[in-house]
Amino acid sequence: MSKKLKPEHSDKSGNAPSYNRPALINKILGVFNEDLGRSLNYKQMAKLLHIKDGQTSRLINSCLVELSKKGDLIEIHRGKFKLKTQGNYIIGKVDLTAKGSAYIISDQIERDVFIAAKNLNHALHDDLVKVYVHARKMRNHVEGEVVEILKRNRDTFVGIVEVSQHFAFLIPEKNQMPFDIFIPIENLNKATSGQKAIAKIIDWPENQKNPIGEIIEVLGMPGDNEVEMHAILAEFGLPYEFPKRVLESAEKISDIISEEEISRRRDFRKITTFTIDPFDAKDFDDALSYQKLKNGNIEVGVHIADVTHYVRPNSTLEKEAFERATSVYLVDRVVPMLPERLSNLICSLRPNEDKLCFSAVFEMDAEAHIIKQWFGKTIINSVRRFAYEEAQEVIETGKGDLSEEILALQELAKKLRKKRFQAGSIAFERSEVKFNLDENAKPIGVYLKENKESNQLIEEFMLLANKKVAEFIGKPDAHNHVRTFVYRVHDEPNQEKLNAFSLFIKRFGYQMQTKTPKKIAESMNQLLVDVQGKNEQTVVETLAIRTMAKAIYSTKNIGHYGLAFDYYSHFTSPIRRYPDMMVHRLLEHYLEGGKTVPPDKYEEMCKHSSDMEQLSANAERASVKYKQVEFMKDNVGKEFTGIISGVTQWGIYVELNDNKCEGMVPVRTLTDDFYEFDEAEFALIGERFKRRYTMGDDVTIKVVSANMVKKQLDFEIVKAPGEESFVAVKPTMSRRRF
């Protein structure tokens, strides 16, 4: 807080101080020097100097402009000034915290910059901003102030409408929107209190805490399945229907394949070809063909839907596919990247229909060595559509349709898989939680989707195609020229995270070798085998995945660490992933002798695709969480056994053994002691009695509440780790912790 400043002199009434220009400039600089990070406009400066008359206030404004021109001050907003120090400007993204402050993530500075809530200047989570970084460290970290919002991450938010007589608010659901949105009555768009709706921010005056918005869509009442699924998509800025113009464009595409088009392609229609997909799939974008050659080798064709034949560059369909970048798989539905006429009909490799493909064809010997390879446009006709369960039955019994082909391909897949793991590939194959839904999409059961041999058969040949396409384009030519391409890259794990993980698993008696990437992969694979069926399996697998870097799309190839591939791309799912469409276009361009393309445009497209993939994954997790809460709402008051799956300073996360639903025990309900979070130990530790709650511990809990609006299960401890029963006794300590 600034000290009170004495004026040079007052007028005859003694009511208003006045200054000459040099004295006023000194006073202004004095105010700024008291707090180097402070930014003020002329009105704020006048208030601090106890100046009320308009003439002197206007003189202050003139002095501020003069000091800015001289270089003593900098104008960070229009009319708002700050003392010029040795600080600098950076551009980065806002990472908002639960407390309302933020950190700026930027490639321009080694460490994240802290922004106090008062200095965010209406910037929100993931906004791209320009930040003034203070020259000095404050409270042991670098601080700054947002001076310009370059690009809003979003301007629409989902929430609950609250209407009063003269105005309304939308109360956003997302934790990363800390302000309610003020809605003038005329902007309600017929929304009523209690409804879920989407509001758009239309104005945010500098001097107002809350943004002003309008309701752009009323979703309906909370708890309704359609409302909640649409709300989840809207929460992450994802669409749930196609614009009319996009559907009309799809309807205009012919499903007739001309003889002229067939003549340009390699014809596989007389070679045995089939698909293996989930039982409920409708978009079949990959098929396998099998042919025994006269020399004893096997020709395997990996045939991928030729989406880019139908979706042309710069078309309406192309632009929509790029914006979406991926299909979104919620618990009860798929939100496709392409309209259903394309994704489920024209492009889908449905049985007994001629289909256009882009294919990778391999001649392989009995040991799964690649003798020859070919890439190009084809036409196929699948003779059979298998569900994974049907193919698995053929593998297990040796009987059924196409048993010879499936068993031969299974043997090759097993050998490819063995080689991959010998080369250092890591076996991250966690079971997926799935729901049995009734006709109203209500969850009536939970099961785990297993990764069986039929899944692995398809997986290995898709990996092979992706790898070989990336090698074919990515390897330097005889003149050491490298062509621009789209890769799926995965960096080596962060050493600090790896060391922390290594220390954590020692408590369960496991060891990690961390000296070389290959040693890490070998010991990680052994660990994932060793934990199978153990109580700590879920926790160890979860932490192992968190230790790894995230896979992303990029034109800058660094290889794929998790798969141990030097070259890897995504070629095999163009119906549901836009990067695969980019790969198809580039592969066709280079096969036709085209020169390398500029990388910058493709790198931007890769970044967008990676971002949309993450949003899609977040939405998928939110839909799973919602269905878990819905499934458990009839179990409030019941007890379950579980394992501690996460520990934070605000509570303990517990995954239930029976159904894999996860809820939280708030730390405030642990009233027997004062608990502190030990980040290195992944534990909450009682200060007085030293009771520990650590990831991997067994506990018995009671379901306290199932909040469907917040997608949150609240538990309380019934039996603590290593105890027969648990009695919460309030501590007798005199001091309080908050």
Image: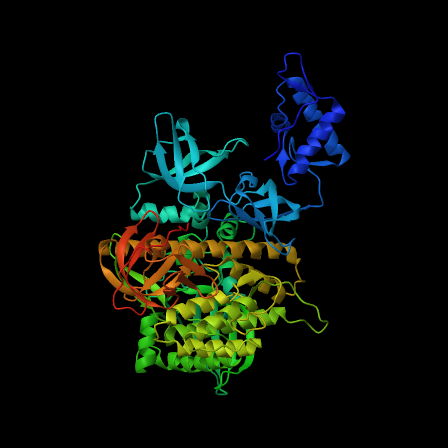
Q: Is residue 353 above or below residue 612?
A: below
Tell me the quarter of the picture where residue 599 sits. bottom right
Image coordinates for residue 557, horizontal then vertical, percent? 61, 66
Left or right, residue 609 beside residue 510: right
Task: Judge by depth and name the residue closer to the eye, 533 or 442.
Answer: 533
Tell me the quarter of the picture where residue 683 sits. bottom left
Tell me the quarter of the picture where residue 51 sits. top right
Residue displayed at 43% across by 75% down: 528
Q: Is residue 381 visible?
A: no
Q: Is residue 463 above or below residue 347?
A: below
Residue displayed at 50% across by 65% down: 262
Image coordinates for residue 279, horizontal then vertical, percent? 32, 65
Total tally of numbered discs in the picture: 0
Q: Is residue 679 above or below residue 9?
A: below
Q: Residue furthest top?
A: 12
Task: Judge by depth and name the residue closer to the eye, 287 or 716.
Answer: 716
Q: Is residue 523 visible?
A: yes
Q: Is residue 220 above or below residue 478?
A: above
Image coordinates for residue 274, horizontal then vertical, percent? 39, 71
Image coordinates for residue 547, horizontal then vertical, percent? 50, 67
Left or right, residue 386 beside residue 266: left
The N terminus - image quarter: top right
Task: Judge by depth and name the residue closer to the eye, 718 or 402.
Answer: 718
Q: Looking at the image, what colour scheme do you see?
A: rainbow
